[in-house]
Image: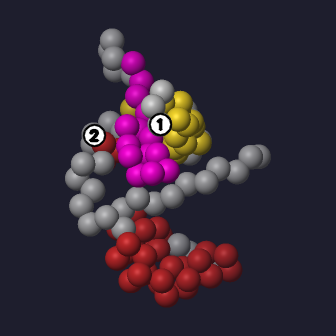
Amino acid sequence: RPSAWRYYRSREEVTALCDALDCRGVREANLKRVLQAEMAELLEEMPRDCTENPSQHEGWLPIGPSVGCRVAREYPTTGLSTAAVVSYLPPDGIDGALWHVVHDDGDEE
């Protein structure tokens, strides 16, 4: 099974991950220990306000077609830009499906 990189974009997601880890498992216990040791610095580097993140709006899903995949887009003036697909909005009526991507330079669409 191919692996896929994923990442956490908000303080809430990192905190929820740490809280959900099961310390009975060796790998999860180790991950939780490392996260707790680095938590203050990690949270300080993350954005404080995620209210403009479209993925947090109703209907956007953290799973779905292409979520977790890497994509590239060629711009005429700036060249190639690579990004990660972070969420999916299924089609609704006549509106087609949408994907939320975060570019490596921090831009989103």
Name the spot of residue 80 as percent of width and height, x first: 55, 37
Q: Is residue 67 left or right of residue 44?
A: right
Asked if residue 1 lies in the magenta stretch, the reply is no
Instruction: Name the disc covering residue 78, or none.
Output: 1
Kindly identify which residue carries mark 2: 58
Q: Amino acid at mark 2?
A: Glu
Residue 62 visible in the picture: no
The quadrant in which residue 70 appears is top right
Magenta residues? 96-109
Category of crowding for the residue at label 1, using alpha-carbon neighbours closer than 10 angstroms: few (below 14), some (14–19), many (at least 20): few
Residue under the point 38% across and 46% down: 107
The quadrant in which residue 27 appears is bottom right
Name the spot of residue 108 as percent of width and height, x first: 38, 43
Residue 104 visible in the picture: yes
**Cβ atoms under marks 2 and 1 closer than 8 Å:** no
Name the spot of residue 106 as percent of width and height, x first: 41, 52
